[in-house]
Image (cartoon, rainbow, N blue to C red):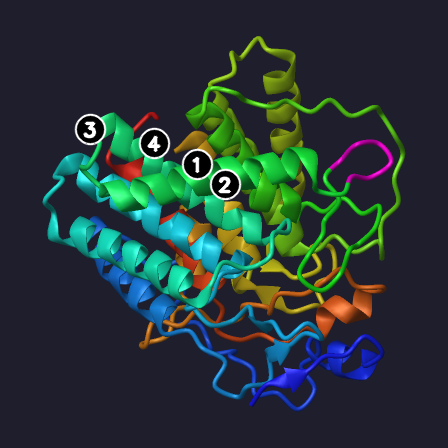
Amino acid sequence: MVLQITEDNRQTATALFTADGFDELVPPPAFDYRTYELNPDEAEDKLALLIKGMTEVADKTGRFVYQLPDGRIIDTCTYHRWEWPQAIGMNGLFDYYQLRSSQNPSDPSAQHTLALMKEWYHQRVEEGIPAKNINSMAVMYSVACLLDLDQQRGKGSLLDEEWRERFEGWVDEWAEWIMNELPRTPQGGFQHVTFRLANEGQLWDDTLMMTVIPLTKIGLLLNRPHYIEEAGTSGTHSSDAPWARGNCWITLAIPMFLELTGLSPSDPVHRMLVSTLRRQVDALLPLRDAASGLWHTLLDDPTSYVETSGSSGFVGGILMAIRLVISGLKACLAQVTPTGQVGNVSKGTPAGKDRKFYKGIPRMGMVYGNSLLIVALVQWMRLTKGESK
């Protein structure tokens, strides 16, 4: 089943972002996060389960697979597609591969993870590369990371010549498109263009993760980083809705950016970003739901549902920044089902016009739900191993 989305079919498009008539994935917590003891062996078991579950995520109803007027089939739920949810999945796999292979390049788990990534890229090439936009750009982060690691360990250690050349062509082409062809806001910011909407004049938190982080990684890889200075301007909120997952991209992107760039603590940009992250975390902590250990999908609205992917992003970003929000990680792990699916994950969505919109977004198995929890769990593993960087 594939839904047909036409330019004037607003009703069908709206149905993509409502839980009405949909059997949501909302299992009860598998355990009480406040008494659960997480250890390295349990973490490895959970990671294996999460990775398996992520590769099996699919929209079995067909409700969220749809065709655009130009014929493109869009599926932001299933693992085997090129879009931002799957790109975040590749980020999680790379994090785990890098961790395991740094200890032993021949480690079976590392080799299995690398093979999964290569298989995913191969399938995407066979299908055809999608149109460029803010979200499809997100794939380039894992591509650049693999290229960088292949160079560090010796060319050919990860990628054969064909794939290295393909990846090098991709990162150069997509970075040039972002810098020279992507529409900009009046102040020069990256307009959040997606496969469906131009979002004219809009700046999204998501852009930090989907485009700015990949572009930063590519710039460093190619030794030509781009720093964009934007004139100060006032802005407006689309719906005055402090949405959890939108905010989590900031929590993740700031420490990622700082780690990628290696900015000195005395650098004004470093000081500004660290101050922003501290203020955000200080504001987040009292908003966490004590009963579930998660954050609500509308952070300041306890009547909105608790949501796992945004919560995983917060935990992953905080753990990345300080390499102890352990109770938060346990709470997210309590949402993992026996089949490796992550419960209480809201479906991907555009900006809503009001707060009610976000409270109605359906919860279902999504690739980024697994991936964000993988990122958080890998950061915990690095922390417990005493890694400082």
Q: Which of marks 4 and 2 is nearer the N terminus?
A: 4
Query: Alpha-carbon distance for marks 4 and 1?
Result: 20 Å
Residue 214 shows in the view: no
Query: Alpha-carbon distance for marks 3 and 1?
Result: 27 Å
Amino acid type at circle 4 is Asp
Query: Alpha-carbon distance for marks 2 and 3?
Result: 30 Å
Q: Earlier in the sequence, mark 2 or mark 3?
A: 3
Q: Which region is colored magenta?
A: 184-189
Evaluate if marks 2 and 1 touch, with contact meaning CB atoms under 8 Å apart.
Answer: yes
Evaluate if marks 4 and 2 touch, with contact meaning CB atoms under 8 Å apart.
Answer: no
Label at residue 154? 3
> Pointer 4: what residue?
148
Please state which of the two labelled residues, at mark 4 or mark 1, is closer to the viewer: 4
- The secondary structure that dominates the magenta segment is loop
Amino acid type at circle 2 is Gly
Please state which of the two labelled residues, at mark 2 or mark 3, is closer to the viewer: 3
Q: Which of marks 3 and 1 is nearer the N terminus?
A: 3
